[in-house]
Image (tube, rainbow, N blue to C red):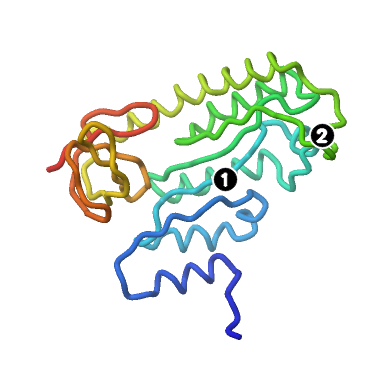
Amino acid sequence: MEKINTNLVALLKEIVAIDKKFMIRIGMMNPNHALEMLNDLIEIYKNEKIFKFIHIPVQSGNNDILKMMKRKYTVEDFTKIVDTFRNSFDKITISTDIIAGFPTETKEQFQESVRLIDRIKPDVVNISRYSARPGTDAAKMEQLKGEETKERSRSLTQSFDWAAFRVNKTWEKWSGTILIDEVGKNDTSVGRNFAYKPIVVKGIYKLGDEIKVKILDVTKHYLIGVKI
């Protein structure tokens, strides 16, 4: 049986070497794994067949909470990865995950998550309200009240919305090629540019079509473009 390559960077090198036209969006990577191959990741990301998009879940902006979550990385590890990618590419989409209301999380520990979002200004944040899973260590801890976790989730969302809008504003007047990958609403199509930013354009196009667009406006979730 042929051996399957399980090393991400080596596998990506094999894929991008295929003599075909395509784009790759790399999926979620835990910070501790990404940190181990950070320099090699930066090099492979320079390939034009790879979307400049990285999904690194941090889960909390406080190291003590991360330890209780049994995460094998620190906030500093996470920010090093983000900063390295941002310093290596003029435009890159950063996606992360945060859990609001983990057991015993104090208000100050939660505020560290809010400040982290404001500091790194990610393009995408998947915010989850903590809910206990039977049999886990966290389920045995003192739980926060549901109203508190709800409020923290709301606060994180508001912080992210503002950060995401500011990031998207930097794309105004950008022009370039997008790959149509979704049928939109109300006679629109959605495509992705080299950084995997979602761009809504008027008109119906076939999936896989490539069109050149210019960004006219932005929202906190997507860019609005016109074909040129």
Q: Are marks 1 and 2 in contact (CB under 8 Å)?
A: no
Q: Amino acid at mark 2?
A: Ala
Query: Measured from the top left, where is residue 184 in percent x and y?
Result: 28, 38
Taking 61 as reference, is 144 above or below it? above
Q: Quadrant of residue 137?
A: top right
Please state, as top left, top right, bottom left or bottom right, where the N terminus lies in the image. Answer: bottom right
| Residues at marks 1 and 2, CA–CA distance in whole angstroms | 22 Å
Residue located at (77% from left, 36% from top):
133
Q: Residues within 10 Å of mark 1 (few under 14, many from 20)?
A: many
Q: Residue at x 40, y 69 (%)?
A: 16
Callout 1 secondary element: loop
Answer with mark 1 or mark 2, whichever residue precedes in sequence: 1
Instruction: Provide residue 185's location: percent of width, then percent of height.
Output: 27, 33
Where in the figure is residue 94, as x and y percent of width and height?
A: 48, 42
Please tell me which residue lies in front, 165 or 140: 140
Count neighbours of disc 2 (C-alpha within 10 A) and say few if under 14, some if 14 to 19, many if 20 or more. some
Residue in the foreground of this view, choosing between 29 and 167: 29
* Residue that badge 1 annotates: 56
Circle 2 is placed at which residue position? 138
Q: Is residue 98 left or right of residue 22?
A: right
Q: Secondary structure at mark 2?
A: helix
Q: Quadrant of the C terminus?
A: top left
Which residue appears at 60% of the width and 24% of the height?
A: 114
Mark in the foreground, 1 or 2 = 2
Question: Left of 34 or right of it: where is 160?
Answer: left
Instruction: Kindly identify the amino acid type of the residue bearing the numbered disc 1.
Output: Ile
